[in-house]
Amino acid sequence: MNNPRLRATRADKDGLARRPWRGTVREYDLFKELTVALVVMGILTLGLSAIFGSPDEASVTLKSWANAAPADFVATATAELAGSSETAGYGPPYNNTPDATQTLGPLDLQSLSGVQLPIDTANDLVIDPLSTLNAPPPELADWVKASDAQRTGWSTAYSDALAKATDNDPANVAADAGAYGPVPVLTDSLLTMAKQGALDGVLAAKGDFYNFDYTLGTLFLGDGAYFGDLATAQHLTGDQWGMMNETGNTPGQSWLWLFSFWYQVEPFASAPNADLLVVLLMLLLSVALTLAPFIPGLRDIPRWIPVHRLIWRDYYRRR
Amino acid sequence: MSLRENPPREHAPEEDEYHTWTGKARGALLRRLPADKLLPEDQPSYVASWIYVFGMGAIVSLVFILASGVILGLNGPAWYHLSDLGHFVNSVHLWSVELFFMTMVVHLWGKYWMAAWRGGRTLTWITGMGAFLVSIVTAFTGYLLQTNFDSQWIAFEGKDALNSAGIGAWFNVANLGQIFMFHIILLPLAVGAVVALHVLLVRMHGVVPPLEAAESDAQLQTGVRPDSEEAGR
């Protein structure tokens, strides 16, 4: 590339690219091409839509979760009370859990926003919804009066007992009423509320009429195992290239193949900060391709691997 | 293929013929993009490959995306769950998006192998990449708006990447109202604007000549008919 003769030749050629074309031309009808393209792509689009349609698998509700997997629901509600759920330990933008953010050396982008969408899992997902009931369980008052240490002690003990119980069924939990405090009653009341469909509305609208924000319900669902199991069965999770898939056999966001690819390979696949690494890498690659004209090597590949001879083979044949 | 001599081009009047800001702006615009460049009746003889139709394919797919999206938007995000017609319009929206990305990606790689940024076309390349990247974000918000199991799961999984980058608080994938606004107003405007600028730049600069084209090429010699038997040899 340092050969002055080569540089001069390239400048000449780029000069030719820079000047208006003075050579021969062929007839071209922009509007005709537009019309033909509209017809061809229209037939293709309508045909594919008529043949393959589009998937529309009904959403999961807290009601369907509570009815289909009550043990998972109760275990999740208990974890929300104990502060041991994924959401409770997430860090910004939901809460201030220490050392929860994904970092790269000193780079901690996740903390930059601060706690913009504060979520206190015990209150927002369990206690506040229960207090909207016409007749809240009397044990709610015990929870409200208790100290933080007492609450954590009760809910952690109940979490552990549920994990050991046959089928994780609350009915099979070892009797030790004093150790669990009001937690079994609270989580059972929440389960009943969810089974009846009341919890969906309360979590979504937070006591108001209108709702546009499903953050609470989405995070609560995600803290359980049921939601993830459904997604796994549909090949939608991150380690199943889920970013590119949709329910059924319809193609999803296949253009995210490279984004999805990094999650399948090391060191990303098992990195605790995989999201941050993949986002930064994709940002870097996107910027590199956008600025390809300025990047030596990247901009020269089309000269080294002459695919252009195929594209312009007619021109080169007539030189 | 029938080739012919390059006809003389129209020229805008010189700038000193204009006296007002408006006139000077008009002069500058006309000089950069005269009518015969904006709506040409011919193209250089090297524009002769199937690769050139994919850009137009992407634009036309965008037309179908916008048309089906307008119908879906006017009926509200839950309409397509309840109506057969709505479901079909939703399918058209999905498949036009799939075809849009398919054609756009082929167009993008075609232009890469042509090194199509040569000769002052850097901004054309950058706006093309911009259209691709903004379209990815727009499509993502569309997947979040499906109000079904897919969108629920995508919101749950997608939040982690956005939160790790520190933008999840303002671009909250589980906030349907916010995502609806992004998907039907801001991002389509952004895609439309970038694509329009890209197309205008393509028309302004013309299609990039072959990498090995040289002044000595037969098709650059006036008076020579390259499609004649002799030149074709």
Image (spheres, coloured by chain):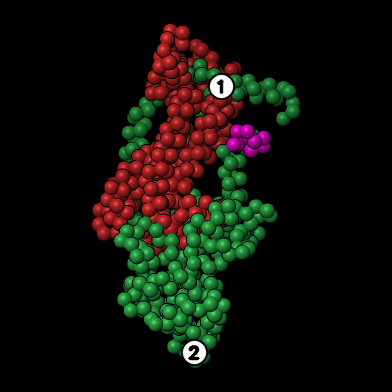
Chain colours: A green, B red
Residue displayed at 33% across by 72% down: A198
Quadrant in the picture for residue B144: bottom left
x%, y% of residue B17?
43, 7
Up-down relation of residue B189 to residue B201 (above or below): below
Element under label 1? helix
Decide if residue B71 is in sight here: yes
Q: Residues within 10 Å of mark 1 (few under 14, many from 20)?
A: some
**Residue bounds of the magenta highlight:** A291-299
Residue displayed at 47% across by 51% down: B171
Rendered image: mark on residue A136: none
Residue displayed at 52% across by 39% down: B129
> Amino acid type of disc 2?
Ala
Circle 2/circle 1 CB separation < 8 Å: no
Q: Which residue is mark 2?
A: A177
Decide if residue A152 is in sight here: no
Rendered image: mark on residue A18: 1
x%, y% of residue A221?
44, 68
Q: Nearer the viewer, residue A171 or A15?
A: A171
x%, y% of residue A266?
64, 60
Quadrant in the picture for residue A300: top right
Judging from the image, mark 1 belongs to the subunit labelled: A
Looking at this rendering, what residue extends furthest in the front direction?
Answer: A145
Q: Is residue A178 left or right of residue A295?
A: left
Residue displayed at 47% across by 28% down: B202
Q: Nearer the viewer, residue A59 or A119?
A: A119
Q: Which secondary structure class fits the magenta region best?
A: loop
Q: Nearer the viewer, residue A168 or A235?
A: A168
Determine if marks 2 and 1 fall on one subunit: yes
